[in-house]
Amino acid sequence: MSGYTCNPRYSTPSPDVLRKLELSRLEAEKVRTREMRCPFCGFLLRIIPVTQTDIVFVKCRKCKFDGALSPAYFRRIRHCRSNRMQWEEL
């Protein structure tokens, strides 16, 4: 459980908090994620879980876009053409 670093000005968290941090880290390793990019410049805004469909408030550090995005509307099918060609062969 010593994999966490924190500012030396703050005291070490209690064993209960360290246990919760470790459990959270183990659960987070199992979650599949995807990138949410800025719709204007393509800059990486945030990495979100695949199952998240709630609105996310973001600000792009590159083009200064500031607004709400719904991950449900900004999904992208990768290799769309190759997938379509596979279905046409069947």
Image (cartoon, rainbow, N blue to C red):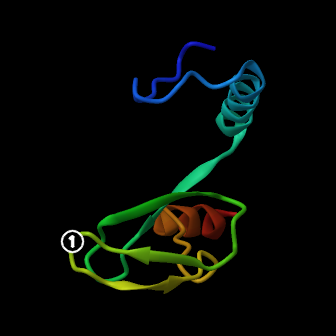
Q: Residue at x 25, y 77 (%)?
A: 41
Which residue is at 47% across, 69% downward? 81
Q: The N terminus appears in which quarter of the rendering? A: top right
Image quadrant in which you'd find residue 90: bottom right
Instruction: Report whether 22 appears left or right of 84.
Output: right
| Rendered location of residue 11, percent (x, y) | 53, 24
Q: Dot 1 surroundings within 10 Å: few (below 14), some, or many (20 or more)? A: few
Front residue of 87/10: it is 10
Residue 47 location (% of width, % of height)? 50, 56
| Above-or-below relation of 33 to 54 | above
Q: Quadrant of residue 50?
A: bottom right
Instruction: State the image quarter where residue 25 is shown.
Output: top right
Q: Amino acid at mark 1?
A: Lys
User: Is 32 situated left or right of 20 in this image?
Assistant: left
At horizontal 56% and vertical 73% (from top left) the residue drawn is 75
Residue at the top extreme of this rendering: 2
| Residue depicted at 68% across the width and 31% down the height | 21
Which residue position is annotated with label 1? 62
Q: Nearer the viewer, residue 85 or 39?
A: 39
Residue 77 or 31: which is nearer the viewer? 31
Horizontal relation, residue 78 to residue 42: left or right:
right
Across and down, in percent, residue 12 comes to 57, 21
Relative vertical location of residue 4 with respect to residue 74 in this rendering, above or below: above
Q: Which element carries disc 1, helix, strand or loop?
A: loop
Report the label total. 1
